[in-house]
Image (cartoon, rainbow, N blue to C red):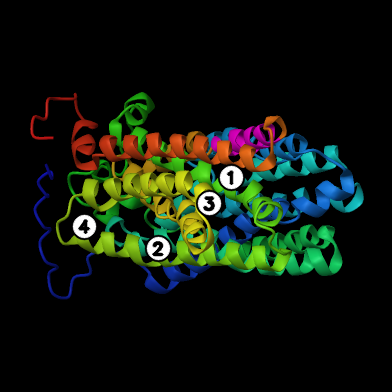
Amino acid sequence: MVEPSPPAPPRETAGVPPHPGFDRRRAWLIAALIVTFMLVNYADKAVLGLAAVPIMDELGISNSTYGLISSSFALLFSLSGLIVGFVSAKVSSRVLLFSMATLWAVAQLPVLFVASVPALIAGRMLLGAAEGPAASMSMHALYKWFPEDRRGLPSALQISGAALGMLIAAPVLTWLITGFGWRSAFAALAAASLAWSLAWWRAGHDGPYGGERARGAHPPAGTAGSSAGQRLPYRRLLLNGTVLGSIAGAFGASWAMALSHAWLPVYLRTQLGMTPGTAATLISVVSAFSLVLLLSVPPLLDLLHRRGLSRRWSSGAPQGIAVTVAALAMAGFPFTEGGIRLTLLALAFGGHAITFPLHYMTASAVVPPLQRGAVFGIVAATGTLPGLIAPYLTGHLLDSASSQSAGYTRSFLLSAGVMAACGLAALVAIRPERDARRLPSTPAADPGR
């Protein structure tokens, strides 16, 4: 049964701005920088997969070894996301994002001097450590510039940087790899990271909706943000259904994303017989599909929420449904051919995209602003663990299967099972209005939900 919607907020008084601290022009400048930040971030993630075939040929490495190199990216990814999440309460977003982007540039350098498995692992580990907090901390920085009821489109744009990263990076990096060698792609990304860090240092100051300064922002009553300066025990924050469901949704979506970055380009070339250019084009199409979803669905859901639809149905249920539908497509496309296969493939690797902005929105709805960065870090750290598991597991399945085709099929079916379980968990567990009411005081029975 659909839970009752909260009463609609009163209309704004004429001549009185609803959010006194909101600087629209500056907020959207910050949003543009953060979208670019995420674009470079996901291009960094994707470059290894796009260069996988020439790297494996040049270094003579097996599928399992390549999977290990890919998984090494996630070795420190979750831990750094967790640590920096807590640090964010004391260090400005300007300093955090500048430091991350600078380290991204440094992480691309080892393979330019020594092309070897240890150099690749070292570079990917450093890159993972520097990118672990990127999504959560850039979202935290973005939320400092937008009030709670205006975050749908900015959140979608932030995550759309990921889709843009693949949409733009796949053909550009493939052109560099095929025309100038795979090392040139790593060098180009190092230069892009350095350029962004300098631009951010100049413009990326913190906004008025973070921590103590959020007190004048008048967040909606009935949410954990209504007491901007309040702190709650992390145990209570992390064990409520909305945060756990948000983690589940992120885990399922991240499993598909990790598989896509590490193995989709290789699968398209070795199993479907595509040229590098054709494979890059298909990856761009999948990214364009994700981008369309990101730019249309979250803003629409945010509008429905402002008109009275509960956060459970405007943010919680859609992310659970998205991951579940992507799981069904993941299970089906290995057994189809032609256009149907490509359609299901796009849905499997692109249909989960809306989960990423929505799981931040649902977690934010039950967390005080002072603790938002730390909780975002924890959600990102646990939700992105698939990056440590999926690439190596897939490489192992490929090397142990009777054929490459059988190995890929087993990997996709396993992925579908994990994603379906996560999607259903998110669908059932995320209830922001209920959990926000329960957090500030002793939990009480809530028979209506």
- Relative side of 143 to 188, left or right: left
Q: Which residue is mark 3?
A: 93
User: Furthest residue to the right?
Assistant: 113
- Relative side of 230 to 137, left or right: left
The amino acid type found where label 3 is placed reads Ser
Which tag, 3 or 2, sits closer to the chain's start? 3
| Marks 2, 1: nearer the viewer | 1
The answer to whether residue 402 is above or below residue 201 is above
Q: CA gap, disc 1 to disc 3?
A: 30 Å
Q: Please report the residue visible at 13 percent of the width from the left and 74 percent of the height from the top.
A: 14
Q: CA gap, disc 3 to disc 2?
A: 28 Å
Which tag, 3 or 4, sits closer to the chain's start? 3
Which tag, 2 or 4, sits closer to the chain's start? 2
Residue 71 numbered mark, or none: none
The amino acid type found where label 4 is placed reads His
The image shows residue 239 at horizontal and vertical percentages of 33, 26
Q: Nearer the viewer, residue 34 or 354?
A: 354
Residue 305 numbered mark, or none: 4
